[in-house]
Amino acid sequence: MLVFLEVVLLLLPGVTMLSLLNRKITAIQAGVITGLGFMVVFGEILVGSLFAFDVETVKVTYRSLVIGKEWWHILAGPIFIIWYLFIFTEISIVSTRRHKEDHSKSQV
């Protein structure tokens, strides 16, 4: 069940960015949605780090992309973070571009 949440959290920034580019949502809404997803992912990465470095010794009986002791569990965390940071940057760029377009239209 956790894998489904992780897949949603992996796809959430991309879907949010596509919605922003198609003008379905505003940049503020995209930032809030992506920010909430990032907080959940970051919490999961912290828990995964506790398991990976044997700080927490609970037997994990479910599949997860981030939580576990394999090498790819440790690599999945930075990949998630880089993906979210890329989307945050793109949201900022689109927001700035739209603000300039709206500002130039209002002066004409």
Image (cartoon, rainbow, N blue to C red):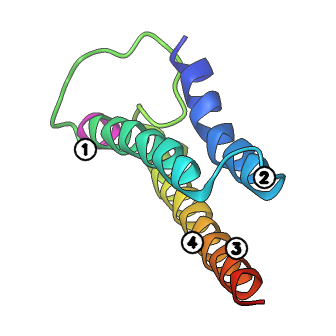
The circle drawn on residue 53 is 1
Which amino acid lies under the numbered mark 2 shown in the image of this protein? Arg
Disc tally is 4
First of labels 2, 3 by sequence position: 2
Q: Residues within 10 Å of mark 1 (few under 14, many from 20)?
A: few
What kind of residue is marked 4?
Ser
Q: Are marks 2 and 4 in contact (CB under 8 Å)?
A: no
> Mark 3 to mark 4: distance in Å?
10 Å
Choose the circle earlier in sequence order: 3 or 4.
4
Give the CA distance from mark 4 to mark 1: 35 Å
Q: CA distance from mark 1 to mark 3?
A: 44 Å
Tell whether 71 sits left or right of 11.
left
Query: Gap between marks 1 and 2, in whole Å?
Result: 43 Å
Mark 1 in CB contact with mark 2 (< 8 angstroms): no
Q: Secondary structure at mark 1?
A: loop
Comparing marks 1 and 2, which lies closer to the viewer? 2
Report the magenta residues as a range.
48-52
Residue type at the position of mark 3: Arg
Amino acid type, label 1:
Phe
Whole-Å distance between the Cαs marked 2 and 3?
10 Å
Percent coordinates x, y for residue 67 in the rendering: 41, 32
Q: Nearer the viewer, residue 80 or 89?
A: 89
Q: Residues within 10 Å of mark 2 (few under 14, many from 20)?
A: few
Mark linked to residue 92: 4
Work out whether mark 4 precedes mark 1 in sequence or the reverse, and give the earlier one.
1
Quarter of image, res 8: top right
